[in-house]
Amino acid sequence: MTFLTGWGRTAPTPARLARPRSAEEVAELVRRAPGRGVAARGLGRSYGDAAQNSGGLVLDCTALTSWSLDESTGLVTAAAGVSLHDLMAALVPRGWFVPVTPGTRYVTVGGAVAADVHGKNHHAESSFGAHLRSLILVTADGGSRTLTPDSALFWATVGGMGLTGVITEAVFRCLPITTSRMRVDVERTRDLDHTLETMTATDDRYRYTVAWIDLLASGGRMGRSVLTRGDHADRDELPRGADPLAFAPASRLKAPPWAPNGLLNPVTVRAFNEAWYRRARPRTGLVQGIAPFFHPLDSVDGWNRVYGSNGFVQYQFVVPFGAEATLRRIVSRLSAEGVVSFLSVLKRFGPGTPGMLSFPVPGWTLALDIPAGRRGLAGLLREFDDWVAESGGRIYLAKDSRMPAETMAAMYPRLGEWRKVRDEVDPGGVFRSDLARRLGL
C-alpha cells in the first residue's frame, strides 16, 4: 500500500498503486478491479481527495504519454498521461498553444478533461471541455468507448472527476501563435468595487485576464487588486534578434523539504501583499514569457511544502453575475477575520460547457489557499458554503477537500442526471475515490 494525498497534503489514505503503460493494461486492471474499486490519477495536482482511493486501486496514468499533432488543423491527439508542460514544450516552438491552461502546467490531459479545467481565458473561450473533439474512455466492463460531444456519457465524463471510467485519450484543438511571449497590461485597483467595475468594463478587450486580490487589506482598501491581462504577442513586438518561439521553462527554485507550520501567518502574508501590490507598477504592453504569465508558482518546485506539515485547504467558489453581494460579504469576512491566503485569485467566467458536473458558470470565481489547522476554519468555510449555495453558486470539486455531500447536492443541479448516466455505464460502482465517498457520488 502507498499513502497518497492531494496537492494540499491533507488527509493521506493508503491504496494499491499500479502504473499501466498502455490503454490495454488500463483495461485489464479495470477488469480485475478490487472490492474497493479503481481511481485514476495523473500528476496529483487536484488539491483534495479526488485522486485517492482508500483501500482500493489507484492507476497512475503518467506513463500514457503518446501524442500527435495535425499541423494543418491544430488538432492534438494525446494519451491521458501527457502533461500540459510536455505538450507546451513541444507545441510552442511549432507555433501552437494549448486551448486552456490552469495555473500550473503540471496537469495531465486526462486530469484536464476530468476536472474540465479553466484558465484566464474562460470569459472568452470557456473551459477545456469546449475544445474537445473526442475521448476514449475505458468503462467498468474493461471495454473502450470513443465518445463525442453528441453523447451524454461524454458530458458526464467532462468534469466528472474520473467517476465514469478511465480516460485514455483525448482529441482537442489548439491555438495558433506566432511567438512564445505575452503582451501584458498591468493595473492596480484601489478596492473591491473598483476591481469589479474595471474587470467588467475591460475584460472583453483581452483573451486572458486575472486579478490577484489582497484579502488582508481592510477599510477603504479592502479587496484592492492587481489586474494582469493580455494576449499572445506578435513577432514585431519582440526585441530584435529574439527567437520568436523559444520556450524552455524550468523550475528555478526548490522549496525546502520541510517548513514550520505557521510560516504563512498574518504578519508574513500582510508584508508580502504590501510588497506585491507596490511592486506591480501600472504597465501597458509589457512583453513577458508564457511561464511567468500563466504559471508563476511552477518556478518553485514543491511550493506546496511551504505550508508546513499541516498542508493547506484550497477553497474556490463561483457566484453568478448579479450575486456580487455574496462575493463582497465573503471578502469582507476574510478581511475582518484576518484569514491568511497566500494566493488569492479572482476571475470572471463566461458560459460553461454542458459538462454535468463542470464547475464554471457565468459569474465571479475566487480561489483561496488557506493553511490547514487554522482555528475556526471549518466553521467559517461551512458558512461560506451556505452563502454560495444560496446565491446559486458552487464549489470546485477539483480543489475541494472538505465539502459535505448535502452541500454539493444543493450546488450542482444536474447531479441526478449525472448519476443516471454513471449508473448506466458503471452499475457496480467500479470507479470510486475518496471524494466520491465523501460526497455520496
Image (cartoon, grey):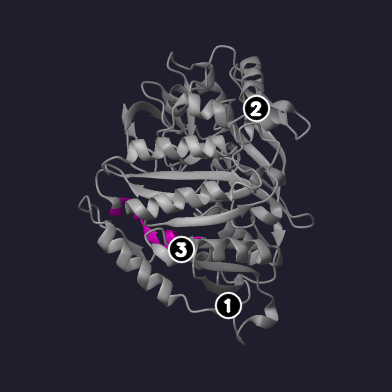
Q: Is residue 310 above or below residue 224?
A: above
Query: Tags 2 and 1 in contact by the CB under 8 Å rule?
Result: no
Q: Check disc 2 and report its element: helix, strand or loop.
A: loop
Q: What element carries label 1?
A: strand
- Which residue position is annotated with label 1? 287
- Residue 167, horizontal then vertical, whole percent: 60, 33
Q: Give residue 182's position: percent from left, percent from top.
A: 60, 71
Q: In the rendering, which numbered label is found on residue 414?
A: 2
- N-term mark: 3 or 2: 3
Distance between mark 3 and mark 2 Cα atoms: 35 Å
Whole-percent x, y for residue 9 in the image: 33, 41
The residue at 29%/40% (across/down) is: 376
* Residue 298 is one of the magenta-drawn residues: yes
Q: Mark 3 points at which residue?
A: 296
Question: Which residue is at the front of the view, 354 or 25?
Answer: 354
Image quarter for residue 268?
bottom left
Name above or below for residue 409 compared with residue 352: above
Q: Residues within 10 Å of mark 3 (few under 14, many from 20)?
A: few
Magenta range is: 295-306
Earlier in the chain: of badge 3 and badge 1, it is 1
Point out the residue furthest to the left here.
260
Sort mark 2 into few (<14), some (14-19) or many (20+) by Cα contacts within 10 Å. some
Q: Identify the amino acid type marked 1.
A: Val
User: Nearer the N terminus, badge 2 or badge 1?
Assistant: 1
Residue in the image at 60% along x and 37% along y: 392
| Most common secondary structure along the magenta stretch | helix
Residue 371 visible within the image = yes
